[in-house]
Amino acid sequence: MKKRAIVLNCPIDLYNADEAINEVRCALNEKRNFHIITINPEMIMNAQKNKPFFDIVNNSDMNIIDSVGVKLALKFQGINQNQIRGVDFARLLVKEAAQKNLKIVFLGAKEEVIKKTCENFLRKYPSLNIVYARNGYFNNDEEIIEEIKCKDPDIVLVGLGSPRQEEFIVKLKTKLQGAVMVGVGGSFDVFSGIVKESPKIYQKLGLEWLYRTILQPERFNRIFPVLPLFLIKCIIDIIAKKG
Ligand code: UDP
């Protein structure tokens, strides 16, 4: 049965990585389109003020916890659920594609990043069936969607940043049949080796955001007003619901 929680009116699926991959396998077996959001506080806050994005978050097929902020918000509700890092989940999907000979698409990031990502994955999985790979700097969405449609992919990883990647997937979803589509944010930067992955200790402590902010200080402005505001809003919401 589907285990779901709600954080600020956004559904969150309470799955560990194995359960999430099982959902993916079911969708692939049943040839259902399946949109996965790896959700974080910035996205939930964006959904509060951006109705079209709120609708996307509420109509996706699975929203998995990609952030310690969402994990904390669930803890306030008495729910203990670990996060599945988006980058780890994307890796699992690539592994699944390699093992089951599925057709995979990589869309997003800079040209050298996506090239290096393909090289690295093909070195690891020589038989990986990458049917389409393209950098994420384009504005002819309809043409790109047609190109992807022609490849009839099983798995599509889209790393354009949020909300662009989710908006793109919603349009793509109407054209594909039986495809698993997931927004992977900056994961290609990590897969290419161009951005260093946070050390295990930061991941374990849920401080990956801190590591990334140290490496890219420009992220500070993006994360900082949002994270405390998100947590305060979650607490107010819980108090209001109890009252
Ligand atoms: N990006 C892109 N096209 C754009 C803007 C961004 O492909 O028009 C890529 C960018 O190169 C990076 C990713 O989208 O690889 C966004 O990464 P970010 O760190 O913002 O995402 P997060 O991991 O924080 O969700």
Image (cartoon, grey):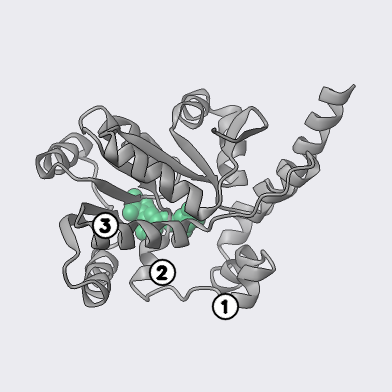
Element carrying mark 1: loop
- Judged from the image, the secondary structure of the residue bearing numbered disc 2 is helix
The amino acid pointed to by label 3 is Ala
Label 1 or label 2, whichever comes before in sequence order: 2
Q: Position of residue 19 (x, y in %)?
A: 50, 48
Residue that label 3 marks: 97
| Residue 195: image location, x then y, percent | 43, 73
Task: Kindly identify the amino acid type of the residue bearing the numbered disc 2.
Answer: Val
Circle nearer the N terminus (3, 2):
3
**Are the residues at dot 1 and dot 3 in contact (C-beta closer than 8 Å)?**
no
Q: Confirm or deny contact between disc 3 and disc 2 (CB under 8 A).
A: no
Q: Nearer the viewer, mark 3 or mark 2?
A: 3
Location of mark 1 (residue): 199
Q: Quadrant of residue 98?
A: bottom left
Q: Compute the Cα span from label 3 to label 2.
A: 19 Å
Which one is nearer the viewer's eye here, 21 or 34? Answer: 21
- Circle 1: residue type: Pro
Label at residue 190: 2
Which mark sits nearer the N-terminus, 1 or 3? Answer: 3
Task: Point out the image quarter for the N terminus.
Answer: top right
Q: CA distance from mark 1 to mark 2?
A: 12 Å
Q: Is residue 128 above or below residue 21?
A: below
The image's mark for residue 221 is none
